[in-house]
């Protein structure tokens, strides 16, 4: 039965943080915020929000923080930055990020308070007087901002950033370059994760919380359809309580040493590290493949079954089937999904609703049914492909590459389940939905928001 979710809260992004697209081609003017991150910035036990924008959609240049009531906390950078593009006479403008980018909310120094860690336009670029190339990391720096105030705690401009661009032998490889995502990890052996890794084109860089370079790796797989994973996955693959990196065609130990380097076929767009039966494993969307820490196959559905593995997720999707199951968007940017068990048996194939980009797959622990549900913009499906939950009150998605409802699963309401936080980067509103109406003496305050890798290392899009 299709059930409507309960709208717990609707948050308007503060007007101070909004940009405005003028009316054009018969379309009305539009206020928009940009990409969103979540976390407890103030230490009050509630979820807060960060909205950010990027020059030319690729170089973050503005961040605004606000709370659950939509009240501004702070801002940093230049909201409507313009400058010239190097190599051409084009003008570059601030837009909503072309893909979710390198901004993370996490207590990276473990002082008990969250920080915002990001790659960000440097002072010269923020002046607007310097031309820049969107497709390289020149005029970018690493920042750690105090979550409560936005003040700079650490900044660094490592020389290695100058090497990182989309040009290889003079050719642009944009599909390999545009997904910049910081992933928090524990490479150093601290009691909690205090490092992070980022893929910038075919360069993979690892840093600690002091913004010191730990190691770097250069991938050989960067041409379209044969590229490494768009977004890296991190997790403990060998049981040593340190994190490894799954890049698809390569796996890296906590010190950057390759665990495997081999061609696993086309479209390894999305990857995971998770527990597979009795051992940790690297999961790949392309070909529906699962590898152990040495790169040996535990499962391979094959590219005949998964010709273009756009996205993959892993959860308890079928109550009467042993173990957990994979859900794979198996046919590129289409609504085609399949469910497979750990033996490789295909349990179901179905089509979710069409959405503007046909991406945005997620697993949600929604209610007390004992199984997870599948989010595909913008509804929840069970393991048989039945649409079981819809989200009332959502305006139509704005459309385009990023104009659809991105999803954060998060325990916002202090219950034992996950709520769904939805936003369209081209709009000005965030929606939080829950399974049941929240009963509390004060529905506006909860002191039990949990910030886990599902929030700070969110996949968002592959």
Image (tube, rainbow, N blue to C red):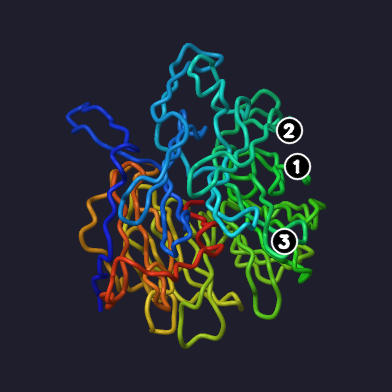
Q: Earlier in the sequence, mark 1 or mark 2?
A: 2
Q: How many marks?
A: 3
The disc at residue 435 is none
Residue 213's disc is 1
How much space separates mark 2 and mark 3, taking CA atoms?
Answer: 22 Å
Please, what secondary structure does the residue beneath circle 2 have? Answer: helix
Residue at 66% in and 50% down? 196
Nearest the viewer among 322 and 109 is: 109
Residue at x-position 68% and y-position 39%: 202
**Residue farthest bottom in this picture:** 320
Q: Secondary structure at mark 1?
A: strand
Q: Which residue is mark 2?
A: 160
Counting from the top left corner in percent of width and height, residue 190 is at: 74, 61
- Residue 8 vertical placement versus 427 (above, below): below
CA neighbours of label 3 inside 10 A, class few (<14), some (14 to 19), many (20+): many
Who comes first in sequence, dot 2 or dot 3?
Answer: 2
Q: Are marks 1 and 2 in contact (CB under 8 Å)?
A: yes
- Residue nearest the viewer, comparing 36 with 154: 154
**The N terminus, quarter of image:** bottom left
Residue 210 in sight from this viewpoint: yes
Query: Label 3 belongs to which residue?
Result: 243
**Where residue 367 sits: x, y (%)?**
37, 79
Decide: few, some or many residues near mark 2? Use Cα within 10 Å; few <14, some 14-19, many ≥20.
few
**162 lies above or below 218:** above
| Residue 436 in the image, given as x and y percentages of width and height | 28, 76
């Amino acid at each position: 039965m299709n059930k409507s979710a309960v709208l717990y809260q609707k948050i308007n992004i503060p007007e101070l943080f909004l940009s405005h697209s003028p009316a054009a081609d018969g379309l009305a003017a539009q206020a928009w915020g940009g990409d969103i991150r979540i976390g407890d910035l103030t230490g009050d036990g509630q979820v807060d929000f960060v909205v950010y924008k990027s020059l030319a959609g690729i170089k973050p240049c503005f961040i605004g923080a606000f709370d659950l009531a939509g009240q501004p906390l702070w801002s940093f950078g230049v909201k409507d930055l313009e400058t010239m593009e190097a190599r051409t006479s084009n003008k570059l403008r601030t837009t909503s990020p072309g893909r979710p980018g390198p901004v993370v909310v996490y207590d990276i120094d473990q002082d008990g308070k969250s920080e915002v860690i990001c790659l960000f336009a440097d002072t010269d670029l923020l002046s607007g007087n310097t031309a820049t190339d969107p497709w390289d990391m020149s005029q970018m720096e690493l920042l750690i901002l105090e979550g409560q105030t936005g003040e700079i705690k650490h900044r660094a401009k490592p020389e290695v950033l100058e090497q990182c661009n989309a040009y290889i032998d003079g050719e642009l490889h944009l599909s390999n370059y545009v997904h910049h995502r910081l992933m928090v990890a524990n490479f150093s052996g601290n009691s909690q994760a205090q490092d992070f890794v980022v893929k910038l084109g075919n360069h993979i860089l690892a840093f600690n919380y002091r913004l010191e370079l730990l190691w770097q790796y250069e991938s050989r797989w960067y041409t379209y359809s044969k590229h490494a994973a768009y977004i890296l996955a991190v997790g403990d693959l060998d049981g040593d309580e340190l994190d490894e990196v799954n890049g698809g065609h390569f796996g890296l130990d906590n010190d950057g040493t390759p665990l495997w380097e081999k061609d696993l076929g086309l479209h390894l767009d999305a990857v995971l590290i998770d527990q597979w039966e009795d051992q940790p494993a690297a999961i790949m969307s392309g070909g529906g493949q699962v590898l152990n820490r040495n790169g040996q196959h535990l499962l391979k559905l094959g590219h005949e079954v998964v010709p273009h593995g756009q996205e993959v997720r892993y959860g308890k999707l079928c109550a009467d089937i042993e173990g957990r199951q994979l859900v794979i968007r198996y046919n590129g940017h289409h609504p085609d999904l399949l469910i497979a068990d750990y033996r490789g048996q295909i349990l179901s194939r179905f089509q979710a609703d069409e959405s503007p980009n046909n991406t945005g797959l997620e697993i949600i622990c929604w209610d007390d049914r004992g199984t997870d549900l599948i989010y595909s913009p913008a509804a929840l499906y069970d393991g048989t492909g039945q649409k079981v939950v819809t989200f009332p009150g959502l305006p139509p998605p704005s459309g385009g590459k990023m104009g659809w409802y991105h999803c954060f699963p998060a325990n916002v309401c202090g219950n034992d389940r996950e709520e769904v936080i939805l936003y369209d980067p081209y709009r000005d509103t965030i929606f939080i939905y829950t399974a049941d109406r929240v009963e509390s003496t004060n529905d506006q305050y909860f002191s039990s928001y949990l910030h886990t890798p599902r929030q700070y290392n969110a996949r968002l899009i592959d």
